[in-house]
Image: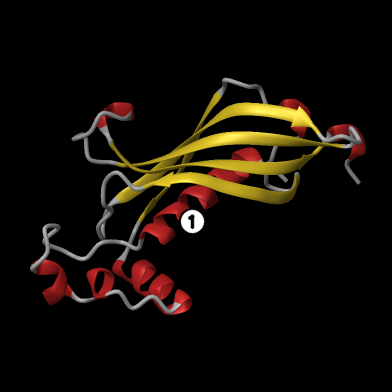
Amino acid sequence: MTGRYYEEFEVGETIEHEKRRTVSESDNQTFCDMTMNQQPLHLDADFAADTGFGDRLVNGLYTMSLAVGLTIPDTTDGTIVANLSYDSVEHPNPVFHGDTVYAQTTVTEKRETSDGERGIVEMHVEAFKVDEGGNGPDGDTLVCEFDRTALSLKREHAE
């Protein structure tokens, strides 16, 4: 278990997650198949070539899910009760096959539950692709951002 208990989150802190993943064509295809999303912009190279993007886009929900997964070890692995919400999701730039994605999390708010036994932690997650062409960390490009709210165990009430 590597996640943090409620008491270990600090409002205002930014957690830079070390894990990264290079997105493959297979990742995108499998995600689209599993979710029954057959949008040709994700799957059909000829169709996508005739769009303003010029190539197939990685499914945005995969990008968001990947961002969540990259953050879990440093935030809520083994210490979460439940995810309560994902809000304000934006995809300002596309992800393509072969792009490497990483994430960072900023803790924006936290509060105890009314019974005092657990805590609610609000986080802003940003996912970037490595390309040195954007305005993110190291010049990388922001590809997804969202707010995540989690119900977290408190250390004193952990079972």
Give the secondary structure at mark 1: helix
Residue occupying the point 11% across, 76% down: 46
Residue 65, given in percent of the width and then of the height, sits at: 49, 56
Residue 126, given in percent of the width and then of the height, sits at: 43, 38
Circle 1 residues within 10 Å: few <14, some 14–19, many ≥20: few
The picture quadrant where one finds residue 55 is bottom left
Residue occupying the point 8% across, 68% down: 50
Colour convention of the picture: secondary structure
Tell me the kind of residue under disc 1: Ser
Residue 3, given in percent of the width and then of the height, sits at: 69, 40
Residue occupying the point 68% across, 35% down: 121
The picture quadrant where one finds residue 7 is top right
Residue occupying the point 39% across, 75% down: 37
State left or right for residue 21 relative to residue 107. Answer: left
State left or right for residue 59 relative to residue 44. Answer: right
Choose between 41 and 80: the one closer to the eye. Answer: 41
Kindly identify which residue carries mark 1. Answer: 65
Residue 16, given in percent of the width and then of the height, sits at: 49, 31
Which residue lies most toward the left here? Answer: 50
Choose between 132 and 56: the one closer to the eye. Answer: 56
122, above or below 80, in the image: above
12, above or below 140, in the image: above
The picture quadrant where one finds residue 150 is top right
5, above or below 73, in the image: above
